[in-house]
Image (tube, rainbow, N blue to C red):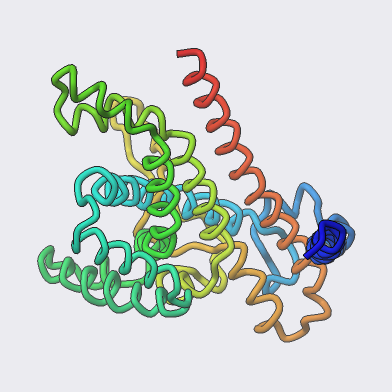
Amino acid sequence: MSTATRRSKDAVATALIAAVAASILGIVLVILGDIFWKGTKAISWEFLTQPPVQGMTAGGIFPAIFGTVSITLLMVLMALPLGVLAAIYMVEYAGSGSVARLIRAAVNNLAGVPSIVFGLFGLGFFVLFVGRNLDRLTGKDLFFGQPAMLWAAATLAVLVLPVIIVSTAEALTGVPRSYREAAFALGATRWQVVRGVVLPQAWSGILTGAILSVSRGAGETAPILFTGCAYYLPRLPLAYLPVPLLGVRIPMLNPFDQFMELSYHIFVMATQSHDTTLTRPIQYGTTLVLVALTFSLNLAAIVLRARLARREVRE
C-alpha cells in the first residue's frame, strides 16, 4: 500500500470519526438547549424554595432538591470507602491470582446489571431482610423495615460501586512501582506503603470515581422507586434533636424517613399526572434543576480534585 493511499484512508477515517463526534455533541447541545429554553420559564424563587401544592401542579420542588442532595451525599459516603478498600485489596493485596480474577469478574458483572434489578435487590435485602430483622431485634413495628432514605442510599451505593472500584484501581495501578519499592527498602510495611505513599498519589483518581458516581447516582430513578422515594411528601426528611440546656431543637437529617427526589418527581409529572400538559413546565423546570445540581456537585468534586493535584505537585 502506497503512502498516498494510506494517508487518504487515514483522512477518511478521521473525517468519519469527527463527523460522528460532532453529531453526538450536536444532539447533546440540542437536548440541553431545549431543557434550558423551556426550563428557565418555570424557574422562580418560589419554585426553588417552596413545597408542591395543589396536587403538585403548583408550588415548588424544594423537598425534591433537598432529598436529591441528601441521598447523593449519603450514597457517596457509603460507597466511596467500600469502593476504595475493595480496589486497594485488588491492586495491593490480591495480586494476579484466582481471587483477584474472581473479584474483577464480579465487579464487571455488577456493572452490567440493569438499575431496576438493583431496586428489587434493595427492596428485598435492605428493606425486607435487614430492616425487618432489625425490627425484630429492637421490638419496633415497621421502623427499620420500611422504605427509607438510608436503604435508598445503600441501594445506590451498590449501584455505583463498580465505577468507584474501577477508577480507584486504575489510579492505584498508575502509581509508579518504584515508589513502593523505595518505601519497602526503608522498612515500611505494606499498609504503611499504601497509606503513606500510594493513596496520596492516587487521590485525584479516587475523586474521579466519586465524580462519576455522583453523575451515575444522582439521576437514577429505578433503584429508589421501591426503597424510599415518595410520590408526594411536601416536608423535609428531618428529625429534631432537643437540647435541654438551650431550650431549642436542632434539625438533623432523618435517614429512616421517606423523601422526594428530582428524577422521580419528573417521572411522576410525566406519567402519573392527570394532565401532563399542565405539568409540562414543571417537568422542564425540574429537569433543568436536576442537570444544574448534578453539574454543581461534579464541579465541586472537580475543584477539590484539582486542589489535591496541585498540592501533590508542590509536595
- Foreground: 147 or 58? 147
Q: Residue furthest bottom?
A: 274
Q: Residue furthest left?
A: 137
* Residue 114 shows in this picture: yes
- Horizontal relation, residue 206 to residue 5: left or right: left
Task: Name the residue: 19% across, 63% down.
Answer: 98
Q: Is residue 281 above or below residue 82?
A: below
Task: Name the residue: 72% across, 62% down.
Answer: 287
Residue 305 pos. (x, y %) = 53, 32
Q: Is residue 223 above or below residue 261?
A: below
Task: Name the residue: 75% across, 66% down.
Answer: 58
Residue 182 pos. (x, y %) = 26, 21
- Would you identify the image quadrant in which residue 20 lies? bottom right
* Residue 31 shows in this picture: no
Position of the C terminus, as image quadrant, is top left
Position of the N terminus, as image quadrant, is bottom right
- Horizontal relation, residue 277 to residue 225: left or right: right
Residue 43 pos. (x, y %) = 81, 54
Residue 83 pos. (x, y %) = 34, 51
- Horizontal relation, residue 95 to residue 153: left or right: left
